[in-house]
Image: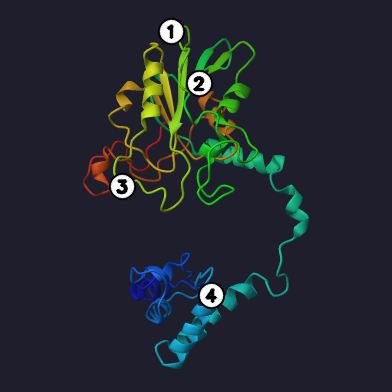
Amino acid sequence: MHSYQYLITTVLKGELGFSGFVVSDWNGIDQIDGSVGFTAAEVSTAVNAGIDMVMVPTAWKTFLSRLRTEVQNGHVPMSRIDDANRRILTKKFELGLFERPFTDRSWTPTVGSAAHRALARQAVRESQVLLKNDAGILPLTRDNNKIFVAGKNADNIGNQSGGWTISWQGSSGNITPGTSILQGIRAAVGPTTTVTYNQRGTGINSSYRAAIAVVGETPYAEGQGDRTGAMGLDREDLRTIVTLRNAGVPVIVVLVSGRPLDVAGELPNWTALLASWLPGTEGVGVADVLFGGYAPTGKLPMTWMNSVGQQPINAGDGQVPLFPQGFGLTY
């Protein structure tokens, strides 16, 4: 895309009338020729394609020098430089950045406030997508109940937050203040309900009325998150779910993931499936839906594959999905 003048300039800026400015990806122009580091040809190609602001985090002095040379030797016309500057300056003027270049720092102490967390909790519950609910197992009753919770993502803020959280790739554990899904479940039930937790499911028996398996992915961002082979649950998750199923109780799978996973082969063994995506710090929003404080309203924003071999799969491409785009149950 960094060299694709047709889409950036002809389509986006021309046909679609985009009046903003286009920013490159991090070191994105370096990748045009597939070699490490950017060349003069990559600089001129990217700018001529229509990129207005180039994200060069370290070698920016070299970039400026090469761009200047490419303009002087006629490889990049001044009209393209003027267009890029005009687009950037226009937005800065519209945003009032010359009059008010900094944010209002008086708001800084409010970051992470109760109001912010309440809004985040709302976002969590509204983004839950109920994909299966046999026998109306959900919502669970808050009172006089006995529930077993298991899974590596049940009590892990880092896992439920995903990548780009505190650090680039994110990490597991208590990396930031918040409420885990397990803590949300415990806070949602009444005093007459028992909630037992063991990550691997050890200790469950037939006396429990339901088991909640909070499973799925661990944090990743681009690159390190690529899964070029299997896209199913890992062995730990599968073992945990089998342990719960062997107790003979209904199993509700809460899937914490940044994308649809390959679960078609396992789904018939699950009583319910709730796609939680990456709920972030407010795991209590997941519990809001599990216990019926709010009926699920989320719908799939993409087509959910029947198998990894279908990827890429999209609405209208003739492939039969596990769940179609726009699917989502409610109570």
- Report the mark closest to the observer, 4 or 1: 4
Residue at which label 4 appears: 60
* N-term mark: 4 or 2: 4
Mark 2 secondary-structure assignment: strand
Residue at which label 3 appears: 228
Give coordinates of residue 248: x percent, y percent: 38, 11
* N-term mark: 3 or 2: 2
Q: Residue furthest top?
A: 207
* N-term mark: 4 or 1: 4
Res 130 label: none
State the residue at coordinates (56%, 47%). 165
Three-letter code, disc 3: Thr
- Report the mark closest to the observer, 3 or 2: 3
Mark 3 secondary-structure assignment: loop
Within 10 Å of disc 3 (Cα), the crowding (few <14, some 14-19, many 20+) is: few
Three-letter code, disc 4: Trp
Within 10 Å of disc 4 (Cα), the crowding (few <14, some 14-19, many 20+) is: few
State the residue at coordinates (49%, 82%). 83
